[in-house]
Image: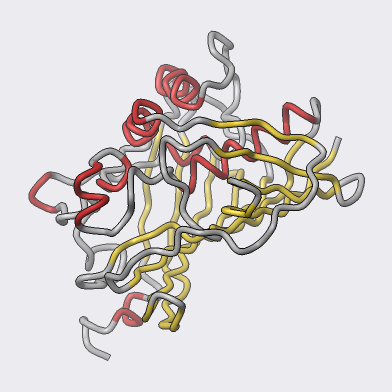
Amino acid sequence: MTVHDPAAWIGRTETCLDALDAGHAGRVALSLGAGIGQPFEYLPPLWHWAFFIEGQPYSRLGEDGHPRRGGFLPPAADRNRMWAGGRLEFHRPLRIGQPAQRRSRIAAVKEKTGRTGSLLFVTVEHHYFQHEALCLAEEQDIVYREPSPPVLTGTQPAPAAQWSETVTPGPVMLFRYSAVTFNGHRIHYDAPYARDEEGYPGLVVHGPMIATLMVHAFLRAHPGARVRSLAYRSVRPLIAPNSFQVCGCLQSDREADLWAQQEGTLAHRASLFFER
């Protein structure tokens, strides 16, 4: 393999430290409209995506606003990057204000063919530690697709929901979430770029934010529940400022199906296991 072969990146590692600043946790709450004015002792589920960030100088950013490929993540020239989904196991909560560490590894790189052409899937393993105790284990799927019109219409009907919340993702909300996650991808805040370069009709709602809002809705519907694992995936993008719903239903006394829907069809899906 040459260094230009994406599969050569399998096994690469990266370590990131974070003090889990309480002030930043408050800004994450504001970006999500969650728990305003409420003090947090631990990071709520999925808020870790706003921490453990390895920033890059402007000289190392690509045209899309992401870090240039070929560093920790493999090269994928002339392809558009998307967050496809992932799987998480929650062992213990991360305490705010205490030092923590993320250890990451490229676990898999696979080329596939989809409805929009050739797709390069990269799976990244993350393990999060605090005082050397494992708090969270995660597999994250990133997909690089060849430039082509994205699939925007839903074909899978949404099931009947036991709980549902409506989200109206305005540009300020998307900008704030981009800011707290230090996500430079221009599809979330630069409408001309999203439209003219990546083929979206408007700003794109962040996949991680959708997953977080789905879990928030579950926890509000089931006070006292503790999330043990989550598997989620994107079915299609959601475009701002069109409203969508984050919904769910119980499958058993410890399992729930979650989804985001718009105009009656699915956009994101998740399976969550919990305990009380």
- In the image: residue 186, left or right of residue 276: left
Say which of 218 and 15 sits in front: 218
Q: Quadrant of the C terminus?
A: top right
Residue found at x 57% / y 29%: 43
- In the image: residue 7, left or right of residue 115: left
Q: Quadrant of the N terminus?
A: bottom left
- In the image: residue 3, left or right of residue 132: left
Residue found at x 38% / y 63%: 150
Image position of 25 with respect to 105: above or below: above
Say which of 27 and 64 sits in front: 64
Residue found at x 57% / y 12%: 39
Q: Residue furthest left?
A: 59
Give x and y (percent) for residue 8.
32, 81
Give x and y (percent) for residue 74.
29, 71
- In the image: residue 88, left or right of residue 21: right
Image position of 269 with respect to 129: above or below: below
Q: Residue furthest top?
A: 37
